[in-house]
Amino acid sequence: MLAEPRVPNGKITMFYMSSSLAFTAGGIILLYMLWHAQPVEGQTLNALVFGRVIDHLGLGSALARHGLLPTVLAFEAALLLVGAQTGFLDGPAVLSNMATDSWVPRHFRDLSTRLVRQNGIVVMGAASLLILLWTRGDVSILVVLYSINVFLTFSLSLLGMCTYWWRHRHDGENWLRHFGLSALGLSVTTTVLVITLVEKFTEGGWLTVLVTSAVVALCFLIKQHYDDTRAQLAKEDALFAGPPPQVDEATAPDIPDPSQTTAILPVGKHRGASMHALLWVNRLFPGHFKNVIFLAVGEVDAQSYEGAEHLERLRKTISTALEYYVAHCRRHGMAADYRIAFGTHPVGEFMKLAGTTMDEFPNSVCFASKLIFKRVSFLTAWLHNQTPVEIQTRLHLQGRQMVLLPMNVG
């Protein structure tokens, strides 16, 4: 969201935001004190104060009362509406980071504007509508729900900053100042959180605890499912661990011939799944395909923006895996090559690679693995096989062929 250089721009942005927020909050409190604002049934404190200001300025006519005051309150509502959009603005990016760490479905991880923002806005909009219907629009409950979750977010963020500076206390001399500032903020936000939770527990706080706990439990359930699946796939990866097979350069085929039949295999992080697809192709079509082209996309996420070194390590990791596949094919008499791309939208990059490769090798078919679970639940359909199915659908719409090969998991 911030232009480069991000750190200086982020500091300036935070300074402007904190200054404007402090000025606004301080000004409102000052108005309350000067005009002796007291709760009145059916009116907000802002409406009461601005009504008195209008009366004091000699604009207390019926026209002013029924014209200026609603206008001021309309601007206030518009400001709140703009503030409410911040969740939709940055929420999808938060979902993307959570998906990268497997806390939410992986198809939220793309940093592309179309998918992340579309999926993220739909999820948050549906959740907001559900909560609105559940609470029947009761503002008192919604304010408590908002307050508790906001200060919970602040507390967790500052706790993370405290943990970060404590772990890096040996990396610099200024760590204590940063740690102390984060700890001070943590103590303030935690105090407000505890007081709000205790005082408002019977006035909607219990609902906040229930909803937030349910969301956290769902995230842990998704994380556990991905970890279990990753452990199963790691067993398959272990079968093909080690360096690339030895190839006799004198007899092994070299460059793929575009005029020959070609199998195109999109590959991912798991070597076992990729080799499973390759072995299935050879088993189903023995001796039919003379060439094999492997396609890999390096997913650029928030960590990849740390610098060129991280991106170069990612490239080396992918190249090492692809060289293993190529060596295996050449050892078994098939010409092989690979293509690599990097991007924030893996499906889009796969489509570009597949399109150019199929144009280069017109007599080609694309193959990919599809995970099949022995125990089927709503999580398996929701969390897996989104990428290969989407690629297959797009290729079929273009009149190109793609076959999904089943791979049993669990």
Image: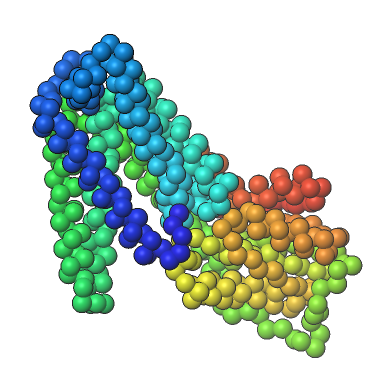
Coloring basis for residues: rainbow
233 lies left or right of 291: left
Q: Residue 232 at x, y = what percent?
A: 50, 58
Q: Residue 229 at x, y = what percent?
A: 49, 54
Relative height, residue 375 to residue 349 (above, below): above
Front in this rendered view, residue 183 or 75 = 75
- Please identify the residue farthest to the top as the structure is shown: 62
Q: Residue 59 at x, y = what percent?
A: 24, 19
Relative height, residue 309 to residue 76 (above, below): below
Q: Quadrant of residue 289?
A: bottom right
Relative height, residue 111 to residue 257 (above, below): above
312 lies left or right of 369: left
Front in this rendered view, residue 334 or 28 = 28
- Quarter holding the N terminus is bottom left
Residue located at (77% from left, 63% from top): 357
Q: Residue 31 at x, y = what percent?
A: 16, 33
Front in this rendered view, residue 7 or 299 = 7
Residue located at (53% from left, 60% from top): 233
